[in-house]
């Protein structure tokens, strides 16, 4: 895991959990947004916390969320 914070996303069909997490596991910020807003929300948190990557859960809705993220940011996306 990088030393810089990451943006972690728990994808869903209607809503997604989005959090900025420090390398030591400290949650720096978190929110729940509608899935259609996840790209914008992730990009904003990444910029605010100087995130090095995005960590994306690979279950429900992850394909659509990944597509939104790739248009909103150029950070590497790691599916878990």
Image (spheres, rainbow, N blue to C red):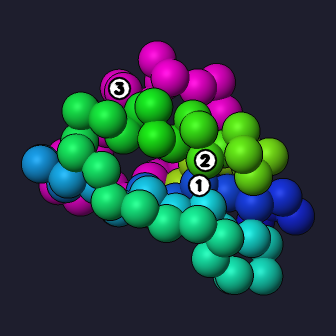
Q: Residue at x 46, y 17 (%)?
A: 71
Of discs 3 and 1, which sits in the foreground?
A: 1
Residue numbers of the magenta segment: 56-79
Q: Residue at x 23, y 58 (%)?
A: 59
Residue to which mark 3 is pinned: 67
Residue to which mark 1 is pinned: 7
The image position of residue 5, as x and y in percent, is 75, 60
- Side of 67 where 4 appears, left or right: right
Check residue 12 for magenta coloring.
Answer: no
- Looking at the image, is mark 3 or mark 1 earlier in the sequence? 1
Q: Dot 3, how many residues are within 10 Å of its Cα: few (below 14), some (14-19), or many (20+)?
A: few
Residue to which mark 2 is pinned: 45
- Looking at the image, is mark 2 or mark 3 earlier in the sequence? 2
- To which quarter of the image does residue 26 belong? bottom right
Residue farthest top in this picture: 71
The image position of residue 7, as x and y in percent, is 59, 54
């Amino acid at each position: 895991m990088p030393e810089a914070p990451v943006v972690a996303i728990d994808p869903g069909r209607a809503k997604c959990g989005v959090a900025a997490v420090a390398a030591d596991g400290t949650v720096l910020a978190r929110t729940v947004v509608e899935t259609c807003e996840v790209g914008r929300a992730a990009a904003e948190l990444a910029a605010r916390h100087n995130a090095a990557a995005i960590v994306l859960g690979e279950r429900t809705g992850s394909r659509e969320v990944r597509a939104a993220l790739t248009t909103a940011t150029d950070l590497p996306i790691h599916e878990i």
